[in-house]
Image (tube, rainbow, N blue to C red):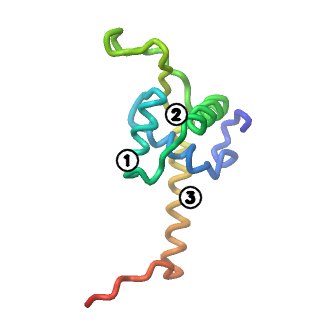
Amino acid sequence: MAKTNDVQSHLPLTPAMFQILLALADGEKHGYAILKEVALRTDDKVRLSAGTLYGNLARLESSGLIVESQKRPETRFDDERRRYYRLTEFGREVAVAEANRMDEALGQARAKKLFRKPRLA
């Protein structure tokens, strides 16, 4: 993806990209913490491989949606090999736009009665 400030040009996000942006929405994380958070938040329904994660981190960073953080935890709590990432303001705008896009699609599915209500016994 080319670096551009046009939110719509980044949509739709891949599911992996969206999950990564969601993981970073509440603060900085290193790669392994992102993997763990996505698996935990999705009750293991989404499990990103290391290859998928790091390829997407590179794409998100080159697109300006995330940046590598220069802040580090205290040395005793850190591993110098870790790279920490944070969501940019533009990345947050793109994540919100994607969530809105999905919400609209879900509304259309409901309007078409795609989801059947369970029958009561």
Nearer mark to the viewer, of 2 and 1? 1
- In the rendered image, which quarter is residue 101 located in? bottom right
Label annotation for residue 101: 3
Residue furthest bottom in the image: 121
Residue 76 falls left or right of residue 45: left
Residue identifier under label 2: 89
Q: Label 3 vs label 2: CA separation?
A: 18 Å
Residue furthest top in the image: 75
Residue pictured at 35% horizontal, 9% vertical = 75
Q: Amino acid at mark 2?
A: Glu
- Which circle's residue, 3 or 2, is located before the other in the chain? 2
* x and y, in percent, of residue 7 in the image: 63, 44
- Which circle's residue, 2 or 1, is located before the other in the chain? 1
Label 3 Cα neighbours within 10 Å, binned few <14 / some 14-19 / many ≥20: some
Label 1 near label 2: C-beta < 8 Å? Answer: no
Residue pictured at 44% horizontal, 54% vertical = 45
Q: Amino acid at mark 1?
A: Arg
Residue identifier under label 1: 41
Residue furthest left in the image: 121
- Which circle's residue, 1 or 3, is located before the other in the chain? 1
- In the rendered image, which quarter is residue 105 located in? bottom right
Q: Amino acid at mark 3?
A: Arg
Residue pictured at 50% horizontal, 26% vertical = 85
Quarter of the image for the C terminus: give it.
bottom left
Residue pictured at 65% horizontal, 34% vertical = 59
